[in-house]
């Protein structure tokens, strides 16, 4: 299976998950610093204080990217490194760090693909209300503008917000992510404000970055139930689809929320939408992060991951659907057909409104470490990636316009509420020594990239 010419092969990371250097060079505190330092919030008390020490070791990590042969690297700017208090003074040492990284990437012929917000909200902005409050909007726009003005001569491809569903529903709905609030009203308000912030960021970037290519990055999952003719299962599937997929697809592409959102969220939604909030800002690409189909009722082993509790809270319980098939270390089902089905679904449902799609994240956690000979034989990751890439290729054959694929993640890193316990990397990180080891999957991926084919 050969991929289209110019297919953008990449790998991804995010600031808080890899950088470390949490208090260095003027970086301010983010909600994840506060959350991870609060006992009981993150498994084993892990924090991102050091993480992969990428802040200091980025030249080595750039070497790894070169070795794998990626054409693009998706990273995120840490807002609290650039504007430590969230608003006001810029921190030149933060800008200098990303200057070095970006210049290094460009010298290596690797395109920088930048996320503006991958969950590290400056703490003062949470103290002022966070994403459930409109007070976050002006500071976000000012931050985006500052980033665009400084880096826009070298970075063209931007994603304003990574996974707005996670920001709102795990941060404010179930509270398993920072800032740890469990309140449906706040989650709905936060969800709406991610849409408004996305729109404003898109407009601001267009103004300050000539030739900017801007796209949302949405974590999507198709609902999966045993019996779609059963009304309860049908309802659960429709609510999951609205809650996770259509809320952002409809608002960003069509400038409206699904009727079902108003029905299910009621006044929580109606009371926060203001005139102009949903005015469509044209996007250049759609980023999809895909890990698994949403098998409603499947209890995940990680308490942090009970996303179906959200559907249950919204409709009063979820139907039982027994788990099917193998899972990764996250307990996530392995459903490679889902990634292709999503790409084909949007191609059909949004037709001319749909820009080119990119898989901006796909990957799996498996706890494989170096064998006695030092080699990391992560064959399960290779199987997972191969199956998902085959499904992407199949979707392209079925008419989907897909411009690239980013593996999550370049490095094993801080997996949020699960700390360092889950390893998603193509590269193994020994956290005690910070030694990096390319896994077999990295070599396999390098070969796929070199051949532009599976
Ligand atoms: O580690 C995360 C990443 O930050 C966002 N997408 C999903 C990944 C795996 O859980």
Image: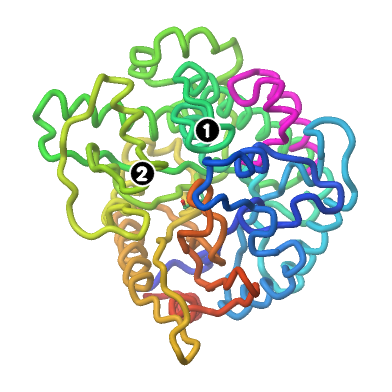
Q: Is residue 372 magenta?
A: no
Which residue is identified by label 2? 347
Where is residue 435 drawn, in percent x and y?
A: 63, 77
Mark 2 / mark 1, whichever is N-terminal: 1
Which residue is identified by label 1? 171
- Note whether 333 is above or below 304 in the view shown: below
Q: Is residue 140 magenta?
A: yes
Residue at 62% across, 73% down: 65
The secondary element bearing badge 1 is classed as helix
Where is residue 230 drawn, in percent x and y?
A: 9, 28
Where is residue 276 drawn, in percent x and y?
A: 61, 15
Badge 2 density bin: few <14, some 14–19, many ≥20, Cα 10 Å = many
- Note whether 408 is above or below 375 in the view shown: above
Residue at 34% across, 62% down: 388
The secondary element bearing badge 2 is classed as helix
Span colored in magenta: 119-147
């Amino acid at each position: 299976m050969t991929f289209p010419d110019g297919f953008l092969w990449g790998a991804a990371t995010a600031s808080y998950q890899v950088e470390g250097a949490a208090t260095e060079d003027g970086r301010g505190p983010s909600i994840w610093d506060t959350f991870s330092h609060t006992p009981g919030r993150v498994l084993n008390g892990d924090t991102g204080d050091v993480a992969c020490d990428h802040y200091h070791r980025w030249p080595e990590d750039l070497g790894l990217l070169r070795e794998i042969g990626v054409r693009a690297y998706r990273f995120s700017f840490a807002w609290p490194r650039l504007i430590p208090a969230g608003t006001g003074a810029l921190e030149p040492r933060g800008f200098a760090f990303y200057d070095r990284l970006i210049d290094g990437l460009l010298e290596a012929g690797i395109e920088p693909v930048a996320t503006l917000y991958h969950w590290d909200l400056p703490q003062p902005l949470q103290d002022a209300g966070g994403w459930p409050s409109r007070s976050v909007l002006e500071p976000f726009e000012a931050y985006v503008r500052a980033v665009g003005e400084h880096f826009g001569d070298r970075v063209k491809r931007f994603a304003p917000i990574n996974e707005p569903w996670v920001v709102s529903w795990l941060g404010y709905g179930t509270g398993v992510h920072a800032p740890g609030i469990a309140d449906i009203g706040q989650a709905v308000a936060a969800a709406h404000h991610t849409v408004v912030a996305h729109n404003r960021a898109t407009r601001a970037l267009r103004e300050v970055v000539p030739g900017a290519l801007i796209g949302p990055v949405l974590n999507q999952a198709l609902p999966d139930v045993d019996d779609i003719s059963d009304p309860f299962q049908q309802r659960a599937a429709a609510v999951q689809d609205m809650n996770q997929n259509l809320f952002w697809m409809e608002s960003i592409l069509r400038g409206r929320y699904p009727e079902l959102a108003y029905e299910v969220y009621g006044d929580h939604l109606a009371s926060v939408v203001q005139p102009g909030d949903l005015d469509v800002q044209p996007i250049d690409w759609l980023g999809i992060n895909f890990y698994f189909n949403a098998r409603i009722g499947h209890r995940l082993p990680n308490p942090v991951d009970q996303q179906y509790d959200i559907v249950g809270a919204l409709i009063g319980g979820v139907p039982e659907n027994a788990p099917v098939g193998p899972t990764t270390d996250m307990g996530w089902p392995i459903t490679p057909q889902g990634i292709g089905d999503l790409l084909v679904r949007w191609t059909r449902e949004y037709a001319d409104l749909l820009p080119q799609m990119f898989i901006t994240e796909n990957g799996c956690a498996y706890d494989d470490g170096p064998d006695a000979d030092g080699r990391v034989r992560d064959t399960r990751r290779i199987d997972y990636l191969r199956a998902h890439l085959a499904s992407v290729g199949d979707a392209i054959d079925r008419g989907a316009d897909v411009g690239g694929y980013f593996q999550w993640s370049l490095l094993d890193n801080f997996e949020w509420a699960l700390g360092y316990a889950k390893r998603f990397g193509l590269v193994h990180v020994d956290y005690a020594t910070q030694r990096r080891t390319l896994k077999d999957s990295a070599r396999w991926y390098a070969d796929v990239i070199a051949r532009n084919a599976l």
